[in-house]
Amino acid sequence: MANPFDQFDEKQSVNPFDKFDAPKSEKSTIGWSDVPLSALKNVPSSAGNFLSGIAKAVAHPIDTAGNLYDAAAGGVQNYAKLAIENENAKRLARGKTPVDSIVSRAVMGEPTEKMQKANAIGQFMGDRYGSAEGVKNTLATDPVGAAADLSMLLTGGASLASKAPQLAKASSALNTAAKYTNPINAITKPVAYLAPKVGGVTADLIGGLGTRTGGESIKQAFRSGREGGESAKILADNMRGNVLMTDVLDTAKANLQVMGASKSAAYREGMARVSRDKSVLDFSNIDKAVSDAANVATFKGQIKNARAAEVQSKIADTVAEWKRLDPKEFHTPEGLDALKQKIGGIVESIPFEEKTAGMVGRNIYNSVKSEIAKQAPVYADTMKGYSEASDQIREIERALSLGNKASTDTAMRKLQSLTRNNVNTNFGNRLDLARKLEEQGGKQIMPALAGQSLSTITPRGLGGAVAGGLGLGGYAVGGAGLAIPMLATQSPRLMGEAALASGKAAGAIQKGAEYGGGLLGKVGMSSEELANYLYQAGRLPQQ
């Protein structure tokens, strides 16, 4: 390809940047008061040129690197020429012979292509910032490019200031200013902020009004694609019918078993610490609870509730017997926990309908539990964690029908409803429980459920009829060009495949960015700085 610098004529100066679409600081009589409004009007075109410069550098990396090298080499040659000219002036003033060597003859001869490139860049920057008029016109016509140039200047200043410890604060301030003036932040930060929100709304619209599968299914398909690996495989297999639908139920139950095992392991670990506490606990409040329970079952020595009186008497005898045992062995936190379990056995044998008797037994049971917790903090922590874990397991088991007595059909219906945010799922409460089940159980279930909801070509139930009607309406209004896209957005399978593919593409970009960011971190450069360097390089003429 032709090199634009080949067109240079020895007798005339041509600015190579005139061959490109970078904004030009044309001479004008614009006043400073008009600069802000002109800059505002030119922001879109200036931002486009900024991104175009980056694109050029990325699209032609070899040419860009070559031009950067040539420009840098030309700058060195120009500096050497200036140095030799100064030295020769001094020599002539002292009556000495000018410098004469192979290097000096090469440098002092006709300007090389590299020197011409360096001169062109100098001329370009001089036109932009070499005069008040140039600065004014640059700000008015190319505000984004001016900000990029300022950011580069501030970055360089911060780098120089960082060499001196006493300028550490100045270096930090310059770095901060460089980030704020770097145009890439003004472009990428709003996009990064708005993209998830726009994507979420789009998924809700497609899932709610289009496929009728719920927005969570579309979001999960995208997340699975972006995450890749097992998550993407699970979703794809369930969406394409490659696995049994009940596999996800088996996974959910396996997760629940893992949660139970973790709960038991944590309890055993906590109780091991409790067993090392040999403190002898006081029975005063336990005795009071036993006495208060007697008042519930009797009145002035007369029995009000025979079954309650029987339970109270049996527990009172159990407590009294325990008190006679060796305190060093049986009155410790571990010993009283055993007493609590023995009382618990009595309470569990009370029929549900005997409410007063049950209340009497539970009051004494809770008093023993409370007394241990009060006098042994380690026990309190252990029981708190055990109780919370037990409650959570029971809630998940109940909400998702994962117990042994629940039918497979009922459990599958509840699981498959998780992708919908409506009254049937307690407006997302079941979804929260499912996510806890995934996190603590270790195996994913949401990708499978989303895949199942997106497995059909047409919407289920009345949604299919509605989709067909909308398709016919679209055909009547705009023909196949309108009908086909309308039908496509209502197909669970098509939208699921599209979301999965989009997620995979986003994941690849994210991984590439993370890898590139790691490399940049090793050389002390941020992605924002790299973008600005690419823009500056992209403004150089490409071969």
Image (tube, rainbow, N blue to C red):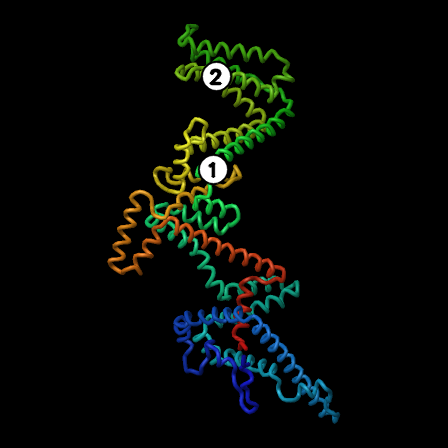
Which quarter of the figure is the C terminus placed in? bottom right
Label 1 sits on what residue type?
Answer: Asp
Q: Which residue is labeled 2 in the image?
A: 347
Regarding mark 1 in the picture, which secondary structure is present there?
Answer: helix
Q: Is residue 139 left or right of residue 71?
A: left
Badge 1: how crowded within 10 Å, few (<14), some, or many (20+)? few
Badge 2: how crowded within 10 Å, few (<14), some, or many (20+)? many
Vertical order, 39 against 382 (above or below):
below
Q: Are marks 2 and 1 in contact (CB under 8 Å)?
A: no
Q: Total marks drawn?
A: 2
Q: Position of residue 272 (x, y in %)?
A: 62, 27
Q: Is residue 467 left or right of residue 176?
A: left
Vertical order, 533 against 482 (above or below):
below
Vertical order, 477 against 131 (above or below):
above
Give whichever of 254, 45 is nearer the camera.
254
Q: Which residue is labeled 1 in the image?
A: 247
Q: Position of residue 66 (x, y in %)?
A: 60, 75
Quarter of the figure with residue 112: bottom right
| Residue name at image x 39 percent, y 49 percent | 493
Q: Earlier in the sequence, mark 2 or mark 1?
A: 1
